[in-house]
Amino acid sequence: SQQGEEDPQALSIQEGENATMNCSYKTSINNLQWYRQNSGRGLVHLILIRSNEREKHSGRLRVTLDTSKKSSSLLITASRAADTASYFCATPPSPDTGNQFYFGTGTSLTVIP
Amino acid sequence: GAVVSQHPSWVICKSGTSVKIECRSLDFQATTMFWYRQFPKQSLMLMATSNEGSKATYEQGVEKDKFLINHASLTLSTLTVTSAHPEDSSFYICSASFGSNEKLFFGSGTQLSVL
């Protein structure tokens, strides 16, 4: 069920630094979403950016979307130890993909206190 | 936000037994529920999609008789791992969507360990 690739696979930064992770996808989309997963837990929806938007902010999160390159990025500013988690991009169902969401391969972020 | 409750969180069972995992949408009626399997440090693998009152749609390679999915109501879907074996040990996560089906709400996951 993966149609997206994310990089880096793993990222380790110091508290206070910014973390950037990237996602590429393959099909046309109506929107792209980012989810967070703490170890051993389910995923939590973070932010949704629509195909006609180029950038969106939510608190310390900044998401960009480039539909011409089929790519998106998630920036977490002023990172905290509590941001340590895996982050996944996802694309929702569409005529091209049927009834399922497609998730990227994920980026494992470690924020060192 | 919408809440999805998944139980149990952790199951340890003997090989050959069956395990049932429940997924409930607590404050909304789920149009569609999805069941995923996740191996350590990997992304989610969709196992099946279930709609209330109809048979689940399984992904290629997922055994229907092994992983029984029941979606009897708009708020409850169950996954039963029948005759579990050690290779079935994994993290299983359910999710639900409703309305415009724009985003997913996830259960907290079930770690299954088959001895």
Image: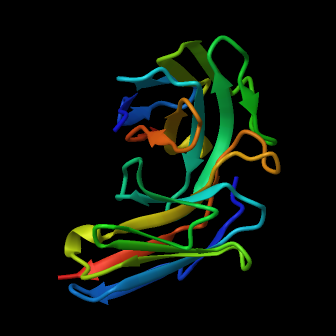
Q: Position of residue B35 (x, y in %)?
A: 58, 36
Q: Residue A86's quadrant in the figure?
A: bottom left
Rendered residue at 53%/82% (across/down): A8
What is the number of callouts on the image?
Answer: 0
Rendered residue at 49%/79% (across/down): A21
Rendered residue at 58%/26% (across/down): B16
Closer to us: B10 or B30: B30
Q: Quadrant of the C terminus of chain A?
A: bottom left
Closer to us: A71 or A81: A71
The image shows residue A6, relative to residue B108, as above or below, that is: below
- Asked if one can make out residue B86 in the rendered structure from this viewpoint, the answer is no
Looking at the picture, the colour scheme in use is: rainbow
Q: Position of residue A7 (x, y in %)?
A: 57, 80
* Residue farthest to the left, as pictured: A113
Q: Position of residue B65 (x, y in %)?
A: 73, 23
The image shows residue B65, relative to residue A25, as above or below, that is: above
Q: Position of residue B64 (x, y in %)?
A: 75, 26
- Judge left or right: residue B6 versus residue A83: right
- Asked if one can make out residue B13 in the rendered structure from this viewpoint, the answer is yes
Rendered residue at 68%/34% (across/down): B48
* Residue farthest to the front, as pictured: A52
The image shows residue A103, relative to residue A101, as above or below, that is: below
The image shows residue B22, relative to residue A41, as above or below, that is: above
- Judge left or right: residue A60 versus residue B75: left
